[in-house]
Image (tube, rainbow, N blue to C red):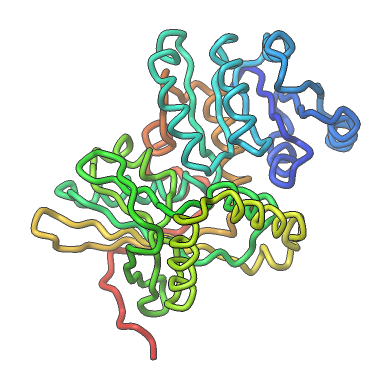
Amino acid sequence: MSGRALLYGVTGFTGREVAERLRGLDIVVAGRDAAGVRAVAGTLGLSWRAFPLTDADVLDEALSDIDVVLHAAGPFEETAAPMLQACLRTRTHYLDLNGEWPGFVDALVCDGALKAVGVMAMPGVGLTIVATDCLLALAVATWPDTVRVRLGVSQAQVVSRGSVASAARLLSPYVLVRRNGDLVSVPAGSLAHAFDFGEGLREAAAMSWADVVTGPISTGVGDIEVYSELGWPGRTSYRASALAMSLTGPRGWRRAGEALAAAWPKSPSGAMRERARFVMVVEALDAWRRPRHLRMRTFDGYTASVLTAAAAVRRVLAGDWSPGFQTPSLIFGPRFMLDEGAAELEAPFQPAEACA
């Protein structure tokens, strides 16, 4: 393994844990706050740099000797684009922990430019989108006749302040789904489906997940819907707030969400994380609408993200990459989550009846 990696956002909750797992590599940790970065670097015994993302010349100089960047500093709607553009200019591979779908669209637009300079961009190397991307790819590999997929994600058991803030920024009266290869908006709360996360059928509502952008690239399937577990009362409230947003606009709702995020605990406790799990179910339909199901269980989102992000950096430094916009399952294989010990896959199953 050769080459140098830079982790930007090391003072963040997930960034620091990833840095700890990457010790032993030629890694530089970085961020905007010099004092904070220096303190973390000193604790971990790593080289460090501090620089803003607002000056292209400074960015280019900071990346001049770097082979791969792992970008872990939010809010990604503001920070991802300047870092990706710097990676293009300096011919540096780009990875990030973004889970917000607009960032994937922006990175995909750069596919031609990335290929022209011979570097890779792979956003979403944390739990989002690695777990769902790998699960979709595994399902389509198992059932090659799949023409439509529905993906269900269980309710989050631990949520950090950053996750709440990200959700607030994306509040919208509409959600995105993929239909016949095209991204289509539907009213939020209007699509519901039941998934068996292991304890009987549970209702879920369609949400705008990044897999509607990346799924067709990873699987070749052009009809994709992604759902988050949400019971009838929650879905009713979700639909009502979406209708209100369509009348008033999302700005006020987003401000309220940001206020909630500011009051939210910065990170969940270690005990909470140890107990928490995510369950993801893919329903793969053939041309006759016959459903087949796979279920994957992962650690909490933060532990899984640390494992997969660190593994992605190691693999890219080892030469496991291709130029252009890429997805985890395409480059690292559909079993990436399983190979890194971040998830367990169950055999194909038939959904259980709803619990009383």
| Number of marks in the rendered image | 0
> Where is residue 11, by image quadrant?
top right
Does any portion of residue 57 appear in the rendered image?
yes
- Given residues 133 and 313, the one toward you in this image is 133
How far across and how far down the image is residue 7, in percent?
69, 29
Q: In the current view of this chain or complex, which residue is farthest to the left?
A: 288
- Given residues 63 and 76, the one toward you in this image is 76
> Where is residue 322, by image quadrant?
top left
Q: Residue at x 75, y 42 (%)?
A: 12
How far across and how far down the image is residue 87, in percent?
58, 16
**Compared with residue 247, is residue 66 higher up or lower down, i.e. above or below?**
above
How far across and how far down the image is residue 46, in percent?
81, 28
Q: Quadrant of the N terminus?
A: top right
**Compared with residue 72, is residue 351 higher up or lower down, i.e. above or below?**
below
Q: Quadrant of the C terminus?
A: bottom left
**Compared with residue 346, is residue 124 higher up or lower down, i.e. above or below?**
above
Q: In the current view of this chain or complex, which residue is farthest to the bottom?
A: 356
Q: Is residue 138 left or right of residue 244?
A: left
Q: Residue at x 31, y 41 (%)?
A: 183
Q: Is residue 283 left or right of residue 165?
A: left
Q: Residue at x 61, y 37 (%)?
A: 310
- Given residues 151 and 42, the one toward you in this image is 151
Does any portion of residue 303 appear in the rendered image?
no
How far across and how far down the image is residue 333, in percent?
38, 38
Q: Residue at x 66, y 57 (%)?
A: 256
